[in-house]
Image (cartoon, rainbow, N blue to C red):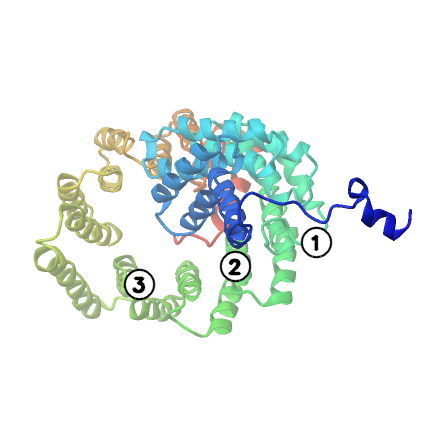
C-alpha cells in the first residue's frame, strides 16, 4: 500500500495517540508525587520505617523500651517481618536481664520463636534464642540452639563452639566440652575469628581450658610479639603466677608496667597489685611497698589503702601505719557522717559498705560486721548480706554465716551475686571439712552461669579433698581460664 492510499483510507491509518476526556497536563505534573507516595506507603505498611527507627534506638544505651514501641508498630504493620520479631526478642531479653531472678523470658522466647518460623536456619536468630535460654539458665535448650548453628557448617564457628563448650561444662558434659575446645584449637589461626579477636589469643584461652598451659603461654607470647598488646602480658603474668613461677610472673608484670609507663592506667594498676602480692610472698616487702605507694597515689580505693597498711605493719613502720590508718578512717567516717548523710538510703548504704570493706581488709572484723549490718538495714541487698556472712565466717560463727548466705540468695539477687554466695558457702563448708556439701554448693554456683569461675575454683578444692583428682583438674583449668579470660580479678 502506498503512502497516499493509507492517507485516503481512514480505517487503515496508524493511530498516533489516544484522546482522554480530561486535560493530561495536571495528571503528568502530579504523577511523580503519586508514585513516591505509593512507595512510601508501601514502605510504611511493610514496617521498614519503624524497624529502622527501632534499630537506631537499639544502638543507644537504655533505649530498649523505646525500640520496642517502634517494633510493635512494625509488627502491626507487617506481621510477617521476621527481623522485627527477632529484634524485639533481643530488646525484651535485655530488659528482663536487669530484673535478676525475677526475670520472665516468655515474651522474648515467643518473639524469637516467631522469627524462626519465617527463617528457621537464620544463625543470628538462633543465637538470640540461645542467649535468651542461657539468660534463663535453660542450658540444655541453649546448647541445642548453638548445636543447630554449628550443624549449619557456617564459616567462623569458633565463638559458637566456645559458647557451647562452656554450657556443656556447666551441665557436667565434660568430654563433649573438651571435644568442642579441641575443635577450636585446630582452627586455622591465620584467619580472623568470628568476633574479630586475635586468633592466637582465642586459641590460647582454649588451651588454658584444656589444661595445656605451655601452649597457651606460647600463643600469648606470639600475640604480644605481633601487636605489643599489654593485655597479653597480663594474661601471661597471671598464668605464670598460677602455675608456680612467681619470678617469671614478676618479670612479665614489670615488662607491662614499663611498656605502658603510666601509673594511672588500669592495666598497670592490676599489674602492680599482683606484683606487690608476689613480692610479699617472696619476703621482698620494700618492693611491695613501692608498688602499694603507687596504687594509693593513683587509685583512692579503700582496699588498696588496707593493703598498703598491711605492708607497713609487716615492715614495723608503726607510726606511719597509725597515722595513715587514722587518716583513712577519718575520711570514711566523714563520707558516712557528713558527705552522704542526706543522700538516699542506697547511696548512704554504699558508703557503709565501703567502710566495712576497709575494716574487713584491715582485719577489724567486728567493726566491719557492724557496718555491713547498718548497710543492710538501710538498703537490703546481696552485697551487704554477703559481707556480713563473710565476717561471721571469719569470727567462727558458722551457723549465723549460713543464715546470712541464705538471705543473700534472694529473688532480688543477680546471678553473679548468687554464684558468689554459693561459692562462699562452699568455702565455709570446706573450712568445716565437709567437702561433699561444698561440691553441692559449687554445683549450684555453676548453675547460675559459672561466669566468675569461683564455683569451679572451690569445687576443685573439694574434689581434691575427696580424692577425685581427675575432676579437680578439669575444674582447676576451668577456673584458671575464666579468671583470666578478660582481665584477672585482684585477689
Q: What is the CA distance from the residue labelled 1 to the residue labelled 3?
A: 48 Å
Q: Which mark is residue 191?
A: 1
**83 shown above or below 278:** above
Under circle 1, the secondary element is: loop
Looking at the image, tell me whether mark 3 or mark 2 is earlier in sequence order. Answer: 2
* Residue 55 location (% of width, % of height): 46, 47
- The image shows a total of numbered marks equal to 3
Image location (x, y in percent) of residue 353: 21, 49
- Callout 1: few (<14), some (14-19), or many (20+) C-alpha neighbours within 10 Å? few
Distance between the alpha carbons at the discs numbered 1 and 2: 27 Å
Is residue 474 in sight in this rendering?
no
Residue bearing mark 2: 237
Residue 12 seen from this side: yes
**Secondary element at tag 2:** helix
> Which numbered circle lies on residue 311?
3
The correct choice, above or below, for 78 with respect to 233 in the image is above
Asked where in the image residue 389 lies, by quadrant, the reply is top left
Disc 3 and disc 2: Cα gap in Å?
A: 22 Å
**For the residues carrying marks 1 and 2, which lies nearer the camera in this image?**
1
Q: Residue at x 33, y 35 (%)?
A: 100
Q: Are marks 1 and 3 in contact (CB under 8 Å)?
A: no
In the figure, is residue 412 to the left or right of 212?
A: left
Please state which of residues 240 and 159 is positioned toward the viewer in this rendering: 159
**Nearer the viewer's eye, disc 1 or disc 3?**
1
**Residue 220 higher or lower than 396, as above or below:** below
Amino acid at each position: 500500500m502506498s503512502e497516499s492510499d493509507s492517507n485516503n483510507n481512514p480505517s487503515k491509518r496508524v493511530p498516533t495517540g489516544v484522546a482522554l476526556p480530561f486535560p493530561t497536563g495536571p495528571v503528568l505534573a502530579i504523577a511523580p508525587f503519586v508514585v513516591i507516595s505509593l512507595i512510601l506507603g508501601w514502605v510504611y505498611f511493610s514496617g521498614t520505617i519503624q524497624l529502622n527507627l527501632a534499630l537506631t534506638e537499639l544502638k543507644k544505651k537504655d533505649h530498649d523500651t523505646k525500640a520496642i514501641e517502634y517494633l510493635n508498630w512494625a509488627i502491626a504493620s507487617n506481621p510477617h517481618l521476621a527481623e522485627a520479631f527477632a529484634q524485639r526478642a533481643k530488646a525484651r531479653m535485655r530488659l528482663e536481664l536487669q530484673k535478676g531472678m525475677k526475670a520472665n523470658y516468655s515474651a522474648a522466647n515467643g518473639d524469637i520463636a516467631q522469627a524462626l518460623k519465617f527463617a528457621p536456619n537464620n544463625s543470628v536468630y538462633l543465637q538470640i534464642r540461645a542467649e535468651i535460654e542461657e539468660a534463663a539458665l535453660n542450658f540444655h535448650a541453649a546448647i541445642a540452639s548453638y548445636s543447630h548453628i554449628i550443624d549449619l557448617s557456617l564459616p567462623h564457628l569458633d565463638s559458637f563452639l566456645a559458647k557451647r563448650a562452656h554450657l556443656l561444662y556447666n551441665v557436667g558434659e565434660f568430654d563433649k566440652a573438651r571435644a568442642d575446645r579441641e575443635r577450636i584449637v585446630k582452627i586455622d589461626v591465620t584467619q580472623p575469628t568470628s568476633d574479630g579477636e586475635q586468633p592466637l589469643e582465642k586459641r590460647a584461652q582454649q588451651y588454658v581450658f584444656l589444661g595445656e598451659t605451655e601452649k597457651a603461654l606460647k600463643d600469648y607470647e606470639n600475640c604480644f610479639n605481633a601487636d605489643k598488646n599489654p593485655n597479653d602480658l597480663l594474661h601471661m603474668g597471671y598464668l605464670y603466677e598460677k602455675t608456680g613461677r612467681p619470678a617469671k610472673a614478676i618479670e612479665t608484670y614489670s615488662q607491662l608496667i614499663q611498656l605502658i609507663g603510666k601509673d594511672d592506667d588500669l592495666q598497670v594498676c592490676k599489674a602492680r597489685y599482683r606484683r606487690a602480692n608476689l613480692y610479699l610472698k617472696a619476703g621482698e616487702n620494700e618492693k611491695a611497698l613501692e608498688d602499694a605507694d603507687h596504687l594509693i597515689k593513683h587509685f583512692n580505693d579503700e582496699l588498696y589503702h588496707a593493703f598498703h597498711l598491711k605492708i607497713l605493719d609487716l615492715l614495723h613502720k608503726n607510726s606511719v601505719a597509725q597515722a595513715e590508718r587514722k587518716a583513712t578512717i577519718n575520711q570514711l567516717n566523714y563520707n558516712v557522717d557528713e558527705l552522704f548523710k542526706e543522700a538516699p538510703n542506697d547511696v548512704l548504704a554504699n558508703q557503709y559498705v565501703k567502710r566495712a570493706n576497709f575494716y574487713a581488709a584491715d582485719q577489724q572484723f567486728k567493726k566491719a560486721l557492724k557496718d555491713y549490718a547498718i548497710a543492710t538495714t538501710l538498703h537490703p541487698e546481696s552485697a551487704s548480706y554477703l559481707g556480713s556472712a563473710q565476717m561471721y565466717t571469719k569470727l567462727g560463727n558458722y551457723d549465723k554465716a549460713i543464715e546470712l548466705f541464705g538471705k543473700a540468695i534472694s529473688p532480688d539477687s543477680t546471678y553473679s551475686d548468687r554464684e558468689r554466695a554459693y561459692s562462699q558457702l562452699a568455702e565455709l563448708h570446706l573450712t568445716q571439712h565437709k567437702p561433699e556439701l561444698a561440691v553441692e554448693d559449687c554445683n549450684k554456683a555453676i548453675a547460675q552461669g559459672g561466669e566468675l569461675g569461683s564455683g569451679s575454683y572451690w569445687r576443685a578444692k573439694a574434689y581434691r579433698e575427696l580424692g577425685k583428682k581427675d575432676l579437680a583438674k578439669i575444674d582447676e583449668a576451668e577456673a584458671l581460664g575464666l579468671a583470666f579470660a578478660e582481665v584477672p580479678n585482684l585477689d
